[in-house]
Amino acid sequence: MAKASVKTSGKPAPAINIGINEKDRAAIAKGLSRLLADTYTLYLTTHNFHWNVTGPMFNTLHLMFMTQYTELWAAVDPVAERIRSLGHPAPGSYAQFSKLASIPDVPVVPPKALEMVRILVQGHEAVARTARELFPVADKANDEPTADLLTQRLTVHEQTAWMLRSLLEE
C-alpha cells in the first residue's frame, strides 16, 4: 500500500484571531480546565455510585445515577473542545484532573445510599461554583460561546443538586 502524504505550504498555521486576546483566552482556558476536571471527577463518582448503590432505594438511585453520569459524560467533550477552540490543550489525565479539581475523588469504600446522594449534592454544587467563578472572565472578554456553555452547565448542576437534595428531606 502506498502511504498517503499531505503537502503543506511549509508555512505555520495562522495565529488565532477570534476577537479574544491571548491573555483572556488563557484565563478562560484555565477556568474551563478546572470545570473539565470537576465534571470528569463528578462523572467518575456518579458512575461509581451507580455500580455500588445498595438498599431499599436501589432501583431509583441506580437509574437516577445512570441518567446523571450519562449527562456528565456528554458534557466533558464540549468543555474540552471549547478549551481547544481557544488555542489551549485540554487536560485529560487523572494526574491533571486531580490537581485541577475542586471536588474530592470518590470514597474508596462505597458509602450508604443517602450518603452517596449527599456527596453528589455537594459535587454538583461545587461544579456550579466553578462554572460561576469563570462567568465574569468570559463575560468581560465577550466570549459568548463560553458564557453559553457555562449557563448550560449551571442549569444542569443546580437542577441536579436540587433534585438530589430533595431525596434527603424528610
Image (tube, rainbow, N blue to C red):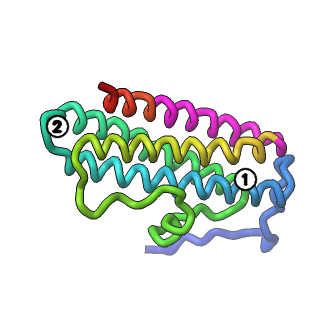
- Does residue 79 sit above or below 109 in this rendering? above
Q: Is residue 62 left or right of residue 19?
A: left
Q: Residue at x 56, y 38 (%)?
A: 153
Q: Residue at x 45, y 45 (%)?
A: 122
Using the image as rendered, state which of residue 121 and residue 6 is in the foreground. Answer: 121
Disc 2 crowd, CA 10 A, few/some/many (<14, 14-19, 20+): some
Q: Is residue 50 left or right of residue 28?
A: left
Q: Residue at x 29, y 34 (%)?
A: 64
Residue situated furthest left in the rendering: 56
Instruction: Name the quarter where the C terminus is drawn.
Output: top left
Q: Earlier in the sequence, mark 1 or mark 2?
A: 1
Location of residue 33 in the rendering, given as x and y in whole percent from the top left corner: 61, 58
Q: Is residue 80 left or right of residue 44?
A: right
- Please check the rendered image and state whether residue 80 is part of the magenta-colored stretch, yes or no: no
Q: Which mark is residue 131?
A: none
Work out how far the residue at label 1 is from the one at label 2, CA to CA, in angstroms.
40 Å
Q: Amino acid at mark 1?
A: Ile
Using the image as rendered, state which of residue 46 and residue 26 is in the foreground. Answer: 46
- Magenta stretch: give its range: 140-159
Location of residue 121 in the rendering, given as x and y in whole percent from the top left corner: 42, 40
- Does residue 87 sit above or below 64 in this rendering? below
Q: Amino acid at mark 2?
A: Phe
Using the image as rendered, state which of residue 86 and residue 127 is in the foreground. Answer: 127
Quadrant hosting residue 100 = bottom right
Q: Which residue is mark 1?
A: 28
Disc 1 crowd, CA 10 A, few/some/many (<14, 14-19, 20+): many
Q: Which mark is residue 58?
A: 2
Instruction: Name the quarter where the N terminus is drawn.
Output: bottom left
Q: Secondary structure at mark 1?
A: helix
Location of residue 148 in the rendering, given as x and y in whole percent from the top left corner: 67, 35
- Marks 1, 2: nearer the viewer: 2
Location of residue 28 in the rendering, given as x and y in whole percent from the top left corner: 72, 53
